[in-house]
Image (cartoon, rainbow, N blue to C red):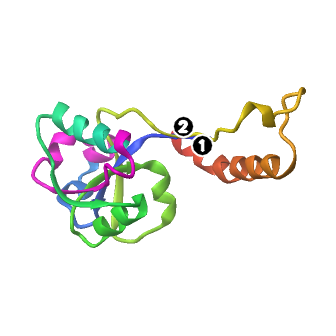
Amino acid sequence: VSSQPFMACLPASHPMAKKKQARQGLPLEALKHDAFAIVMRAVSPDYHDRILAACADAGFEPSLAFELRHWLSVVSVIAQGLGVGLVPAALQQAGLPGVVFLPLERPLAPYDTHCLWRTERTGRDGTVQGALGAFIGTVQAVAAPLRSLSA
């Protein structure tokens, strides 16, 4: 459905949010002294572990101040100035004030969203009919603007 880069999400008041060179690519190690807000491992083990591994690769273990159930909650905590985080680029579209999204100097593997269905629901011509077909069409329409974020 979509594949988006992870972005550093910082409070607008964060010193790195104001540096022009950070807009070209923020070195992750620049956040090693910050508290992190992250999605809970129980909710998204792959992305939780991927973020921790990226921090380890950058030479530090992040201080996890908040482990939350939803990506939007992560951004909301950051908007309150309570930490920093690594989030999918699509969250820029939420329009929350008080946050800045910066590309990472060394990008993480992308945040991928998939839509799967049972093959017996697919007709001989490869199409999906009925409610499932309508649902897939809606998902594709909603995801179309997100695809531009990965370009």
Q: Position of residue 47 (x, y in %)?
A: 36, 42
Q: Quadrant of the N terminus?
A: top right
Q: Quadrant of residue 80?
A: bottom left
**Residue at 39% of width from left, 52% of height from top?**
43
Q: Secondary structure at mark 1?
A: helix
Three-letter amino acid code of the residue under disc 1 = Arg
Find out whether the residues at labels 2 and 1 contact each other: C-beta distance under 8 Å: yes
Q: Position of residue 33 (x, y in %)?
A: 9, 52
Q: Which mark is residue 55?
A: none
Residue 1 lies, with reference to residue 130, above or below; the image says above
Indicate whether residue 53 is drawn in magenta.
no
67 with respect to 1 (left or right): left
Q: Position of residue 84 (x, y in %)?
A: 24, 57
**Residue at 16% of width from left, 45% of height from top?**
30
Q: Which mark is residue 147?
A: 1
How many other residues sit within 10 Å of disc 1, few (<14), some (14-19) or many (≥20)? some
Q: Quadrant of residue 75?
A: bottom left
Residue 49 lies, with reference to residue 39, above or below; the image says above
Q: Secondary structure at mark 2?
A: loop
Q: Position of residue 55 (x, y in %)?
A: 20, 39
Three-letter amino acid code of the residue under disc 2 = Ala
Magenta span covers which residues? 21-46
Q: Which mark is residue 151?
A: 2
Which residue extends farthest right?
125
Residue 52 lies, with reference to residue 98, above or below; the image says above
In depth, the one of 136 and 60 nearer the eye is 136
Indicate whether residue 43 is drawn in magenta.
yes
Q: Quadrant of residue 61?
A: top left
Examine the rendering and report whether any part of residue 97 can be seen. Answer: yes
Q: Quadrant of the C terminus?
A: top right
**Residue at 69% of width from left, 38% of height from top?**
117
